[in-house]
Amino acid sequence: LAYTRLALIYYNRNMDDRALTYCKTVVDKYPRTESSQDAMRLAEMIYVNSGRGDEYLDWLKTVPNADIKITRQDSLLYESAMTQFRAGDCDKAIKGFNSYIERFGSKGFFLINAHYYAAECENSKKNTAEAIKHYVYAASQSKNEHSENATIKLARLFYADKNFGEAQKYYEQLEKIATSEINYIEGLMGQMR
């Protein structure tokens, strides 16, 4: 269909909103067709790549017979935020991770990752209170790929903020979970300050 081709042309010219308009036109005017499916896939790609996965999921609710499983929704929204994180756009990444955390609550498959990467962005923007909130979540879960780094960063942030009691707690935790000698030593040295 011509609308689908126009959507692709606009997408290739980085005119995402115009491309989405044509995708939605195809889906509305030609439901349950191959062109409609192509338009939906293109819309998904545009929304996810631009960090607007939540908008895509909201739009799908308005499309008749567009049933998307909760596991797919979980992955789409997380990937949308990660795309922005990888691109270095922390403002959009934070918004995406927070949307993911809010939408999926304690049931999100990527919840620990979402908190950790949101913390990384918040920390890079010097939003210490928000960074701490997210690092605490990642560090307080059972041992995971971010436990050690979240714990180190919490200890350092609390120490820099002169909250020595909290810093001590995280340096002690670091000593117990460290997988490298340098982190183990930092945990010990942090407790002696």
Image (tube, grey):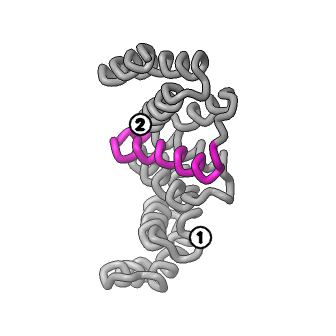
Residue 176 position (above or below residue 154):
below
Verify whether residue 70 appears in magenta. Answer: yes
**Location of residue 78 in the rendering, given as x and y in whole percent from the top left corner:** 51, 49
**Location of residue 19 in the rendering, given as x and y in whole percent from the top left corner:** 43, 19
- What's the residue at 41%, 80% (across, down)? 187
The image quadrant of residue 66 is top right
Which residue ends up furthest to the front in the rendered image?
33
Q: Quadrant of the N terminus?
A: top left
- Is residue 117 visible in this depiction of the protein? yes
Instruction: Give the amino acid at mark 1.
Output: Ser
- Mark 1 crowd level (few <14, some 14–19, many ≥20, 10 Å Cα): few
- Drawn side of residue 56 relative to residue 63, left or right: left
Span shown in magenta:
68-91
Residue 62 position (above or below residue 18):
below
Which of the pair 90/173 is nearer the observer?
90
Q: Are marks 2 and 1 in contact (CB under 8 Å)?
A: no
- Is residue 132 visible in this depiction of the protein? no
- Mark 2 crowd level (few <14, some 14–19, many ≥20, 10 Å Cα): some
**Location of residue 90 in the rendering, given as x and y in whole percent from the top left corner:** 42, 41
Instruction: Give the amino acid at mark 2.
Output: Asn
Instruction: List the residue tagged with mark 2.
Output: 49
- Drawn side of residue 153 relative to residue 33, left or right: left
**Location of residue 43 in the rendering, given as x and y in whole percent from the top left corner:** 48, 29
Q: Which of pointers 2 and 1 lies earlier in the amino acid sequence?
A: 2
Instruction: List the residue tagged with mark 1.
Output: 140
